[in-house]
Image: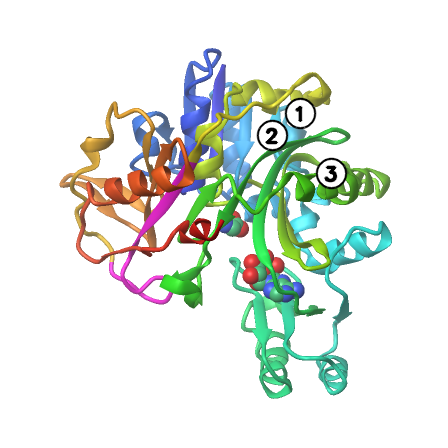
Amino acid sequence: MKVLIVGGGGREHAIAMSVVKSPRVEKIYCAPGNAGIGQIAENVPIEPMEFDKLAAFAREKEVDFTIVGMDDPLVGGLVDVLEAKGLKVFGPRKNAAVLEGSKAFSKDLMKKYGIPTAAYETFDNAQEALEYLKTADYPIVLKADGLALGKGVLICGDREEAEEGVKSIMLYKKFGSAGDRIVIEEFMSGREVSVLSFVDGKTIRIMTSAQDHKRAKDGDRGLNTGGMGTFSPSPFYTREVDEYCREHIYQATVDAMAAEGRPFTGVIFFGLMLTPKGPRVLEYNARFGDPEAQVVLPRMKNDIIEVMEACVDGRLDEIELAFEDNAAVCVVLASQGYPVSYEKGFPIRGLEKFEDVEGYYCFHAGTRLTQEGVVTNGGRVLGITAKGKSLKEARENAYNAADWVNFENKYMRHDIGKAIDEV
Ligand code: AMP
Ligand code: GLY
């Protein structure tokens, strides 16, 4: 079987590492890929938003199965374009990817179907939003409706800050057209958990839990990033929480999408907050998380191609997922200055140390192969994942391995997974 993976980050490297283990796979292409992915797949110089080129490439190479891992092409309808050419694709169609593509859509869906989430109001007019802020409770949360590279959420401590936020999103278009509409929602406090799932339109299978660290600096300070590190499983995701979510959130979401005529096939990522009143949905994503995939997939025992094919064929009910009874921690090695501004092009040393070491992974995110070897090519450069019998052991292993690689401007958080000391 020939597989095409669309994307070129740490998540796509983790997906490729799982795909390469499937005995049925003879060839993997990745568009555009990166230096690490290039070791197990053939990188193809096509960007994820070049739909027609991707379709033509997949047809020409007789690709049997395409996996779309990124939000932008999913929300833009890449799956529909490829399917129209007779290709078999894993990922939601455009009308289902809206679950991530529009926060107003997902909030209205949750309200209509009684899925627990924060109370909210939606506005497409800045004046009305500003009026609403006069009588609101603080802190309050502002969310640009559309995709904003994970940065479209502002938590505002008081009315003044919120007014500035509304203006920056709706009037000054800080996030472009993603801010044509805004969701203003109740602030919730609690621990966050990411739960990924496979879905075939009707059936949902839950993967093991994980937790991301979104802020740039230790102690959850600094700016929001794409994610500075993850651990899995989350010790805060107890059996009780799991039962509640199964009863009120997971299947209810899949059924709601089907009832709306938008059957969802692919991965649903549930961003949950464990509030004192119980678990609440913070957000949905229509894909694997990055860097959640880097701790969840290495622990999965199933053949990923078998699971993904079952999703596309609508027979996920025949599959049971199985995860290793261990833990994994991923520490992101970033370029100093990320997420604002940073230099790139620095040589990376020590990558060979990961070859043939069981339980350790070096996922490439922003890297590029040059004549001088592999160099840094982005804000998030590598994701160093290690397994261990416990979360503590996995964390020690991951931080040890984070020292195996070096490059100028290397930056990482030192407290990934530290919260687990509290349990
Ligand atoms: P989202 O992109 O919707 O996941 O939001 C990004 C981050 O903002 C989340 O991971 C939370 O840390 C925070 N956040 C989002 N919504 C809320 C809320 N209603 N209350 C408190 N924090 C929130
Ligand atoms: N790590 C969060 C995300 O992928 O959106």
Q: Which residues are magenta?
A: 328-343
The first of marks 3 and 2 along the sequence is 2
Residue 208, x across and y down, in percent: 56, 35
Which mark identifies residue 246? Answer: 3
Nearest the viewer among 202 and 273 is 273
Query: Can the viewer see residue 152 in this picture?
Result: yes
Which mark identifies residue 87? Answer: none
Nearest the viewer among 113 and 339 is 113
The residue furthest left is: 372
Which mark identifies residue 312? Answer: 1
Alpha carbon distance from label 1 to label 3 = 22 Å
The residue furthest top is: 23
Amino acid at circle 3: Arg
Nearest the viewer among 204 and 127 is 204
Residue 116, x across and y down, in percent: 76, 54
Q: Are marks 1 and 2 in contact (CB under 8 Å)?
A: yes
Indicate yes or no: mark 2 CB to ligand 2 under 8 Å.
no
Which of discs 3 and 2 lies nearer the camera? The answer is 3
Q: Is residue 3 left or right of residue 191?
A: left
Amino acid at circle 1: Val
| Residue on which the image places disc 2 | 90
Query: Which residue is drawn at the image coordinates 55% and 68% (left, top)?
Result: 175
Query: Which residue is drawn at the image coordinates 73% and 79% (left, top)?
Result: 129
Amino acid at circle 2: Phe
Residue 130 falls inside the magenta stretch: no
Residue 199, x across and y down, in percent: 68, 32
